[in-house]
Image (cartoon, rainbow, N blue to C red):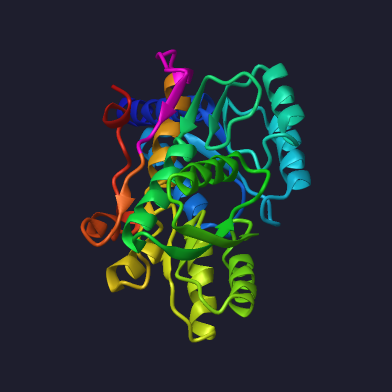
Amino acid sequence: MKHLLAILLAASMELFMSSARAADQMTIAVFTKNLTNPAYEAFRIAVDKVAVASGVKIQHYVPKQPDNVDEQKAMVEQALKDRPDAVIFIPVDDVAMIDSVKKVNDAKIPVVLVSNPLPGNFVTYVGADDFEIGYRQARYLFDKLGAKAKIVVIEGIPVAPTNRERVRGYKRAFAESPGIEVLDSGVGNYQQPDARRVMAKFLADYPQIDAVLSANDGMALGALEALKEANRSAVVIGINGILPAVRLIETGALLASVDFNMFKIGCIATRAAMRYLKGEPLPEKILLPAEIIDKTNYRAWLVPVEQRPCTEWSEVVK
């Protein structure tokens, strides 16, 4: 009888402790822009990896319509009702989402801002230097093309800070390369189908296009599709280092990409949110270095994101 009571008591204590652990589980709300860009999928995978290893609950908020402001605003309202312990936030628009961020600030919910800067109060910002990324990408392309070439540019979402900074980097590179003729520039919205349509129009308008400067890999893939359909060729370069693009670097179909690594950013952003909730110090800003991915080093990026180990805090923040 005593043995049975001891077993029942132990079981009750375990149930109590499990309930207590569940009650104490930290919840982090994670906002990304869309379900269509592989870079954001890599970001979500990274977030989930850190969360599973740390026992943190993650609630993802992703607009069904890519980069839809109204959807993201509604999702912020829902998150305010859900009262997460922290928010990791990638705004779909750095102007339209200011009021929503203010509501989160007013609710005293800590926010880790990611990728796209905007006004507000944040425990830290995690991203990359998009001006430097755009400049390095353009310079690398121009060095490969030589003294003279005719190129087209496919930009991302015009209102996105990442796009504005990358284009600003392009302009600096253009100023330093008088032999590079920019035939045209179009908006691909960071989406493969949009870039495919833009590139098809470029090909119809210009009999000679030597290269395509694309503000992300998804749009570079769209440009390559249009080139194939038109039975034309051009040198194409992108940004993000997503797996489909790296595989095309391996075959030679894509010249290179720049490692705006949303997987690493996702790892560090999640670790930053957890550190804040534990009362550990954070820098005001964390910028991950960009790296050119080309034929010399692409193998390191061939590992699918699901199989990659998540970046440790000490690897980025010294």
Q: Which of 8 and 162 is in front in this view?
A: 162
Q: Which residue is drawn at 55% across and 41% down?
A: 168
Q: Residue 121 at x, y = what percent?
A: 62, 18
Q: Which residue is drawn at 38% across and 57% down?
A: 141
User: In the picture, which quadrant includes the N terminus?
Assistant: top left
| Quadrant of the rendered image containing residue 288 | top left
Q: Residue 107 at x, y = what percent?
A: 70, 19
Q: Which residue is drawn at 40% across and 66% down?
A: 244
Q: Nearer the viewer, residue 310 or 216?
A: 216
Q: In this view, does 198 lie above or below 259?
A: below
Taking the image as shown, residue 187 lies to the left or right of residue 282, namely right
Q: Which of 237 and 93 is in front in this view?
A: 237
Decide if residue 305 is in sight here: no
Q: Residue 186 at x, y = what percent?
A: 64, 60
Magenta stretch: includes residue 277? yes
User: In the picture, which quadrant includes the C terminus?
Assistant: top left
Main secondary structure of the magenta stretch: loop
Taking the image as shown, residue 149 lies to the left or right of residue 69, namely left
Magenta stretch: includes residue 206? no
Q: Nearer the viewer, residue 124 or 194?
A: 194
Magenta stretch in the rendered image: 276-289
Decide if residue 241 is in sight here: yes
Picture mark count: 0
Q: Residue at x 32, y 60 (%)?
A: 144
| Quadrant of the rendered image containing residue 305 | bottom left
Taking the image as shown, residue 10 lies to the left or right of residue 175, namely left
Q: Residue 8 at x, y = what percent?
A: 40, 30
Q: Is residue 87 above or below residue 159?
A: above
